[in-house]
Image (spheres, grey):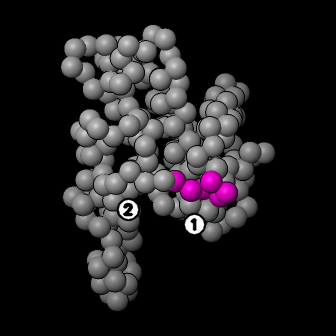
Amino acid sequence: KGPPAEIWQTNHVGPFLLVQELTTLLKTTATKNDSSVRVVSLSSGAHKNASIHWKDPFAVNDQTLFAGAYGQSKLANILHMRQLQTQINDDSETNNNNNNIKCFPVTPGAVQTNLTPSNLPWPAQVFLKCVLRTPHTGIQVIQMACLDQTIPGGSYLSNCCVKTTEGLNGCSNDEGQCNKLWELTERQIQENRFP
């Protein structure tokens, strides 16, 4: 919840900037013997009907969960991890160690956390208790991304399975959109363009 600009900054720009700052360390670590580096970004099934609002991702008018600001930010997590994996694979510095760095967008599912409202009427609380995953269950896909050596980097994980992603008109599988998002985010950071 919140204004689209805050959602975009919190869910996409902040993690993007953090990864940018850590990239040198990630590459250095990957050169060490028996090192396995993972970059894991939390996405959501909310990406399924979303697209990136290229003119201004800070001002998404659609307020629906799956096409609005939240869905857009979670789609951006997928595009970011895929573009980062492509850049790592193409980087001559890490070419000998590119199998040691893997990037994954993952969806832990709907998890009961401290963000879940506690002042709901009791029927809603009972319902949520039945449908929300425990934190222990939600973390399983994150552990899989960090520990399973057989999963190709750039894969999207949900329910502890490699799954295809969607996005509006399949945009989450479009390399051009991955690169376009990377350039847009870098430009926003360089211009210090945050509402």
The mark nearer the N terminus, 2 or 1, is 1
Q: Nearer the viewer, mark 2 or mark 1?
A: 2
Within 10 Å of the Cα at label 1, are there few (<14), some (14-19), or many (20+) other Cα atoms? Answer: some
Q: Is residue 169 magenta?
A: yes
Within 10 Å of the Cα at label 2, are there few (<14), some (14-19), or many (20+) other Cα atoms? Answer: many
Res. 2 mark = none
State which region is magenta: 165-170
In the foreground, 69 or 96 = 96
Res. 108 visible in picture = no
Res. 65 mark = 1
In the foreground, 21 or 172 = 172
Whether residue 104 sits left or right of residue 137 in the image: it is right
Q: Position of residue 100 (x, y in %)?
A: 32, 24
Q: Residue at x 34, y 89 (%)?
A: 123
Q: Callout 1, which amino acid?
A: Leu
SS category of the residue bearing label 2: loop
Res. 106 visible in picture = yes
Position above or below: 2 against 155: below
Whether residue 100 sits left or right of residue 147 in the image: it is right
Query: Dot 2 corresponds to which residue?
Result: 109
Q: Callout 2, which amino acid?
A: Gly
Q: Residue at x 58, y 46 (%)?
A: 173
